[in-house]
Image (tube, grey):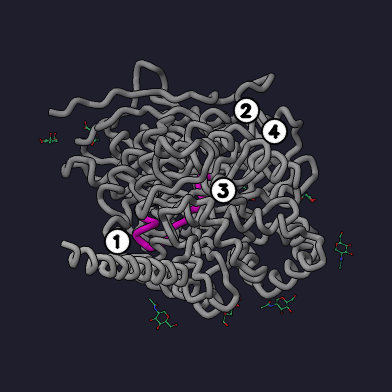
Amino acid sequence: MSSTKTISIPLVGLLLFLCCWTSTAKAAAEKEYYVKYKDPKQPISARIKDLMGRMTLEEKIGQMIQLDRENMTAEIMRDYKIGSLLSAGGSVPRFKATALDWINMFNTFQNGSLSTRLGIPMIYGIDAVHGHNNVYKATIFPHNIGLGATRDKELVKKIGIATALEIRATGINYAFAPCIAVCRDPRWGRCYESYSEDPEIVSEMTDIIYGLQGDIPQNIPKGIPFVGGKDKVAACAKHFVGDGGTIKGIDENNTVIDWHGLLSIHMPAYYQSIIKGVSTIMVSYSSWNGKKMHANRNLVTGFLKKTLKFKGFVISDWQGIDKITYPVHSNYSYSVFAGVHAGIDMIMVPYNYTEFIDILTDHVNNKRIPMSRINDAVSRILRVKFSMGLFENPWADQTFVDKLGSQGHRDLAREAVRKSLVLLKNGKNADSPLLPLPKNTSKILVAGTHANNLGYQCGGWTMTWQGLSGNNHTAGTTILSAIAAAVDPNTEIVYSENPDSELVESNNFSYAIVAVGEHPYAEMYGDSQNLTIAEPGPNVINNVCGKVKCVVLIVSGRPLVIEPHVGSIDALVAAWLPGTEGHGVADVLFGDYGFTGKLPRTWFKTLDQLPMNVGDPHYDPLYPFGYGLSTNPIQSS
Ligand SMILES: *[C@@H]1O[C@H](CO)[C@@H](O)[C@H](O)[C@H]1NC(C)=O
Ligand SMILES: *[C@@H]1O[C@H](CO)[C@@H](O)[C@H](O)[C@H]1NC(C)=O
Ligand SMILES: *[C@@H]1O[C@H](CO)[C@@H](O)[C@H](O)[C@H]1NC(C)=O
Ligand SMILES: *[C@@H]1O[C@H](CO)[C@@H](O)[C@H](O)[C@H]1NC(C)=O
Ligand SMILES: *[C@@H]1O[C@H](CO)[C@@H](O)[C@H](O)[C@H]1NC(C)=O
Ligand SMILES: *[C@@H]1O[C@H](CO)[C@@H](O)[C@H](O)[C@H]1NC(C)=O
Ligand SMILES: *[C@@H]1O[C@H](CO)[C@@H](O)[C@H](O)[C@H]1NC(C)=O
Ligand SMILES: *[C@@H]1O[C@H](CO)[C@@H](O)[C@H](O)[C@H]1NC(C)=O
Ligand SMILES: *[C@@H]1O[C@H](CO)[C@@H](O)[C@H](O)[C@H]1NC(C)=O
């Protein structure tokens, strides 16, 4: 008995010793290997604090930089600790790049970022503003003006879900969308990027953020940036604030409005975006009452960050800080000071990183910009990166490759096209509606510049920045092909881009479908002071309508001068910029579905009425905001 006891004491001691030794060694080993910021079980704030504590000024400034992918290398990412990249409109790894090309490009750059001392992954942004529109064979959805016409926020959320998947199909994790501009003047070349002139509709459409980033779980407080996993992307509400309110719709110009007007028209969609967890907000090139937004500390830091409690990061627009001065980039030192001081966290430089690094470092070393401002910027950027699980899943993989341009997404886009079309006139009088059109008839005419042009029907921000003309730039269905697929095989289709009267008169057409509108454009180039139908569109209307029953589709980013033509037109449809799925147009023209779209904007009579928005005194539109006739679908057997 006693022997057992005597033996047992050293044994217990030995066990104790072993036990203590192992746990000490384990602790030591953990101390060596355990890195708090890399531990996903730690709360995000603890991870940020730990990582920030390890970072040098150089590493912090690197996080604040976003560069375009052009001429970028993994070595630059590594050596300058660059925190973010982007693809500008049309900035692609190669012509007709596949999803795999994009993934490989992404991983090459990410490898550079992960090879740095702290291994902070980069975030990659792209203008995916109506689907993943830079990418060959992606699904192109209607531009926002068309989505505003649907009034369907559930649909818009689904488009967000689909767009996130297509973006992730190429490995990318950040979209510069949604544009929540409230366009108050259609002369602005970005008016089609705006859901509506009505702040309430724009606010509702911010539900697309739930689609892009995911639904916010119960345990995450409202207003905290949230991205729900590998099938979601960080979103960006833009452009803060008043971008759609500039004088005469001049792009990047001055928005003259009082504080109450700014708050009631241009700000509501920002409250909504923040509540819905938007990760980032992009600053507007425009000025508010003469002050450049990129230098507006009261609004960016004071109102957006302090009052609205936005916790994600604020990003500049492309060379946005360069444009604080005139001429552009003429006093870059001042630009960097003013932009960072205003509260911009990430700067879309987008090329000359050494210049930016040198200048910002100098501002910090000379205390013109306090370290607290740098820490605020970097902690916000890291918060977004942690919240989206980027440290755990930094690499692009092939999980979603088959989602790019998938049939399911094309079907969704087709539904969006159907719901976006607004019927403005149907028949010379109410008793003789022209629509829906019969599918089975002897001979029909399809005419106009926009009937057989996929590039035109997609508009700007498609494959390239300003958009393209023609059918071979990506995959999709033109309006003409959709009509051909919809009508009965017995129906003969005559197609002419620019028919003369003779062609129209010498044929016995049952009816004509005319598609005319605007040529593609995007920011800077899209402003128009005349808002006319592009040539020879007016001529096509004159040669066709009046001679044969005609339905005219206006394919455009905004209301155009149409009043002089309305009398001769039998049926008139605002088709906006529908994107790749032309079948949606035929679905409604031929009555498989009814027309349901409502004008998201006021349709003016004459240019001298502009700007004119719903609620204005002396409101005298051709078609008021909210207008839109409906048709019943034909019951097919
Ligand atoms: C990228 O490199 C090419 C070839 O050297 C050059 O022509 C182009 O200007 C560069 N682009 C930028 C943005 O620096
Ligand atoms: C990452 O870079 C290293 C060397 O810089 C290279 O050996 C490795 O293959 C790269 N990995 C990827 C996925 O590009
Ligand atoms: C607005 O446009 C006018 C005319 O082009 C120009 O002179 C002015 O500088 C612009 N203002 C701003 C703030 O961009
Ligand atoms: C840049 O702007 C700052 C601040 O307005 C001014 O002090 C400085 O002289 C300017 N530099 C140049 C080269 O114009
Ligand atoms: C970047 O800016 C620096 C400083 O202004 C200038 O010397 C250099 O030429 C610029 N680099 C490029 C590629 O433009
Ligand atoms: C289409 O019309 C032709 C001629 O009237 C007729 O022979 C044919 O059966 C019709 N087709 C259908 C599917 O109704
Ligand atoms: C489209 O076709 C035109 C004319 O046939 C050709 O010049 C162009 O390179 C083609 N573009 C693409 C993207 O294939
Ligand atoms: C014209 O077409 C209609 C049917 O669309 C037919 O009834 C009529 O006979 C045709 N007239 C001529 C002159 O061919
Ligand atoms: C209307 O304005 C656009 C854009 O400024 C221009 O390209 C076009 O030529 C103008 N059209 C007419 C008929 O003046």
Decide: is 259 above or below 488.
above
- Label 1: how many residues lie within 10 Å, few (<14), some (14-19) or many (20+)? many
Q: Which residue is mark 4?
A: 262
Please name the residue that numbered disc 3 is placed on: 312
Measured Cα–Cα span from mark 1 to mark 3: 29 Å
**Percent x, y for residue 71?**
54, 77
Residue at the (51%, 30%) spot, across then down: 201
Q: Secondary structure at mark 3?
A: loop
Mark 3 or mark 4: name the one nearer the start of the chain. 4
**Of pointers 1 and 2, the one earlier in the residue sequence:** 1
Q: Tell me the CA gap for discs 4 and 2.
A: 15 Å
Please, what secondary structure does the residue beneath circle 2 have? Answer: loop
Q: Position of residue 490 (x, y in %)?
A: 16, 42
- Hey, what amino acid is under mark 4? Leu
- In the image, residue 348 lies at what x, y percent? 62, 61
Q: Which residues are magenta?
A: 165-178
> Is 52 drawn above or below residue 271 in the view shown?
below
Tell me: residue 229, above or below residue 473.
above
Amino acid type at mark 3: Gly
Residue at position x 43%, y 26% in the image: 425
Residue beneath disc 2: 613
Q: Residue at x 53, y 59 (%)?
A: 465
Image quarter in which the C terminus is found: top left
Which residue, given by chain and number where applicable, does mark 1 sit on? 401
Say which element carries label 1.
Answer: helix
